[in-house]
Structures are given as C-alpha cells and as structure tokens.
Image (tube, rainbow, N blue to C red):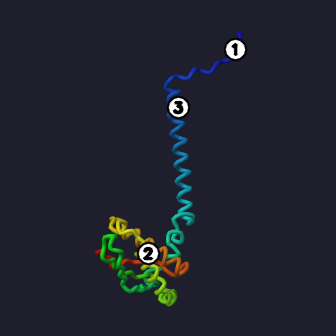
Amino acid sequence: MSTTAEPPAETPDAAQKKSVLRPVLFGSLAAILLGGGAFYAVFTGLILSEQQTSSPSQPSAAETVFIAIEPITVSPPPERGARFIRLAVQIEAPVDSQAEVKRLTPRFVDMINTYLHAVDLDDLRQPAALIRLRSQLLRRTQLIAGEGHVSDVLITEFIID
C-alpha cells in the first residue's frame, strides 16, 4: 500500500469563490492600469492639452477684422421662380491679412455673383440652405485668397424674392 497522502478534495464553496474572485481581481487590475495610463496621458499633455485643443488656423477675436463685401443683387432668369436674390457678407480675416483680403474684394464679388447665378433656387429655399451657402462661400474665398488669409464668411443679409 502506498502512503502518499492525497490533497483534500475542494469543496463546492471553495471552487465557487475562486471562480468569482478571479474575474474581479483581473477587472480591478485592468481598471487601475487603464486609469493610471489615462491620468499619465492627460497630465503629461499627450492628450487634451491646450496646444492640441486650440486651432492654429483660427486666430482669436482680437486678432481678426471683418471686411464687408458690398451687397450683391442677382436677377435669375424668370423661369427660375424668383425676381432677385440679395446677399451681403462679411469676411473674417487675420489682422495681418487685411490688406490682401481687401485687394481681392473684386474677385470675391465675382465669385459670389457667379455662384448665385449657378445655384438652384430650390436648394436655396431649403432649411439648411444658409449653412451650405456659407460653407461654399468660405471654401471658395479661401481658394481665392490662399491659405491662412480668410478665417470665416458671415452672411449678414440674404433675401430671395
């Protein structure tokens, strides 16, 4: 007969405690590691730092000027269902680009006239028309002026009659 002692068999309660305790320990360890990593990333500026949240292409309000473009009135063809479209805009630009933007004002007026003649009036009557119109004008003025010269385009008057 062999004299080796067998370890006592685990009771069902001990096995259940082990199966519940393991995921809790691993979950707690993972939470501590992830929380510590997130704290480190924020504390050292890897994420959510002041430099990353401020856009370098958008100057502050004190560093910008608004250049008014004369109101533009366009007469679409009669079959398009309107007698006229009137639009007035102001271009927001950095102070150091003011002279360049003013010099390009005739090009902006030409671009706006051309765009208003080409756009479908039904599109302009939609609820989101001003948002699309503003984004189109902004993109086109930025292409004309070059990078960094135009910050925004503000629509100050828009009438379809």
Near-viewer residue (15 or 124): 124
* Label 3 Cα crowd, 10 Å radius (few <14 / some 14-19 / many 20+): few
Q: Which residue is mark 1?
A: 3
- The residue at the far right in this view is 2
Position in image of residue 140 (x %, y %): 49, 75
> Going 44% across and 81% down the picture, which residue do you hit?
92
Image spot of residue 54 (x, y percent): 50, 72
Cα–Cα gap, marks 1 and 3? 32 Å
Residue indicated by mark 2: 115
Task: Indicate the position of residue 69 as horizontal and vertical percent values.
Answer: 40, 85
Label 2, label 3: how many angstroms apart (C-alpha)? 69 Å
| Labels 1, 3: front one | 3
Cβ–Cβ under 8 Å for marks 1 and 3: no
Query: Which of the two residues, 30 or 50, is positioned nearer the viewer here?
Result: 50
Label 2: how many residues lie within 10 Å, few (<14), some (14-19) or many (20+)?
some
Which residue is under mark 3? 19
Which amino acid, by three-letter code, is at mark 3? Answer: Ser
At a point 56% along the width and 61% down the height, the residue shown is: 41
| Residue sitting nearer the eye, 32 or 81 | 81
